[in-house]
Image: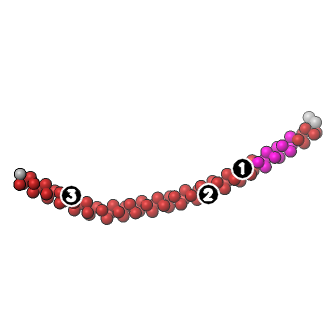
């Protein structure tokens, strides 16, 4: 192999290496940003889950009361029929 051809190949390899290194750096930044967004989304979901649990707990006695009223009304209707 001629020296000039070797030097050209060596230069091209160096350029390719730089491109790969820069791409890896950019990918690393994107991954870090994505991880932060996922962590924030998880926190938001956890907060929403807690809010839903609280709402269910608040609604539970109301629903139980309505069910009891329906049972009493059913008994009265059956009795009157």
Dot 2: what SS? Answer: helix
Q: Please tell me in which quadrant of the rendered image residue 56 appears.
A: bottom left
Badge 2: residue crowd in 10 Å (few <14, some 14–19, many ≥20): few
Dot 1: what SS? Answer: helix
User: Which residue is rendered at x = 83% and y = 43% of the image?
Assistant: 12
User: Vertically, is 81 above or below 12?
Assistant: below
The residue where tag 2 is placed is 33
User: Which residue is rendered at x = 79% and y = 49% of the image?
Assistant: 18
Magenta residue check for 14: yes
Q: CA distance from mark 3 to mark 1?
A: 63 Å
Magenta residue check for 75: no
Q: Position of residue 35 (x, y in %)?
A: 59, 56
Q: Quadrant of the N terminus?
A: top right
User: Which residue is rendered at x = 54% and y = 59% of the image?
Assistant: 39
Q: Which mark is residue 23?
A: 1
Q: Earlier in the sequence, mark 2 or mark 3?
A: 2
Q: Position of residue 47 (x, y in %)?
A: 45, 63
Is residue 81 rendered to the left or right of residue 15? Answer: left
Is residue 52 rendered to the left or right of residue 70? Answer: right
Dot 3: what SS? Answer: helix
Q: Please tell me in which quadrant of the rendered image residue 79 appears.
A: bottom left
Q: Position of residue 42 (x, y in %)?
A: 50, 58
The residue where tag 3 is placed is 67
């Amino acid at each position: 192999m001629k020296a000039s051809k070797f030097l050209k190949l060596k230069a091209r390899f160096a350029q390719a290496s730089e491109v790969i290194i820069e791409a890896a750096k950019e990918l690393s930044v994107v991954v870090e940003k994505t991880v932060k967004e996922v962590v924030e989304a998880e926190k938001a979901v956890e907060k929403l889950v807690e809010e839903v649990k609280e709402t269910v707990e608040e609604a539970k006695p109301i629903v139980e009361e309505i069910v009891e009223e329906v049972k009493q009304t059913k008994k009265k209707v059956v009795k009157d029929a």
